[in-house]
Amino acid sequence: MKESIVQKKSFQFSLNIISLYKNLQVEKEFIISRQLLRCGTSIGANIEEALAGQSKKDFASKMAISSKEARETKYWLRLLKESELSELNVDSLILEIDELIRILTSIVKTSQLNISESKTKN
């Protein structure tokens, strides 16, 4: 099966988060770095699970979890930036996560609409 755009973008984002995590570890910032590693890489993992979903409802549920993880990731990135705990620039990661949030929100809305429409047809 061909890789989807959201799958590719979330995987690349995970790699970028891992890189940020490594840099934060060098700066001895351990708390936020672990939170970012956990939720930032979870986005792609949940997308992978969604793509192997057993039903439309399962797919929508896993994508919704990915969306929530993306929003949590954005929170930690903003907190890292605004708190000035690190000298690292996270602006590009914030732009990336905003794009992922938009894509995931669209997928979740469309999936839920399709589920609702299939229920009304039956």
Image (cartoon, grey):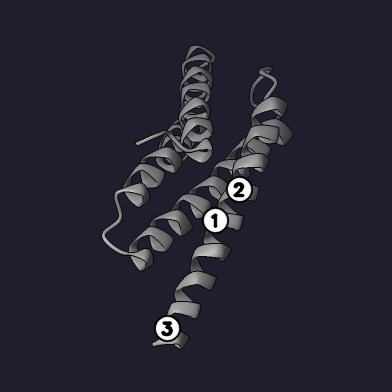
- Mark 3 or mark 2, which has the lower sequence index? 2
**Are the residues tagged 1 and 2 within 8 Å (C-beta)?**
yes
- Mark 3 or mark 1, which has the lower sequence index? 1
Q: Mark 2 points at which residue?
A: 103
Q: Is the residue marked by circle 3 packed among few (<14), some (14-19), or many (20+) residues within 10 Å?
A: few
**Are the residues tagged 3 and 2 within 8 Å (C-beta)?**
no
Q: Distance between the residues labelled 3 and 2?
A: 25 Å
- What is the secondary structure assignment of the residue under circle 3? helix
- Residue type indicated by callout 1: Ile
- Residue type indicated by callout 3: Lys
Tell me residue 113's x, y (percent).
54, 72
- What is the secondary structure assignment of the residue under circle 2? helix
Q: Mark 1 points at which residue?
A: 107
Quadrant where the C terminus lies? bottom left
On screen, 99 above or below 114? Answer: above
Q: Is the residue marked by circle 1 packed among few (<14), some (14-19), or many (20+) residues within 10 Å?
A: some
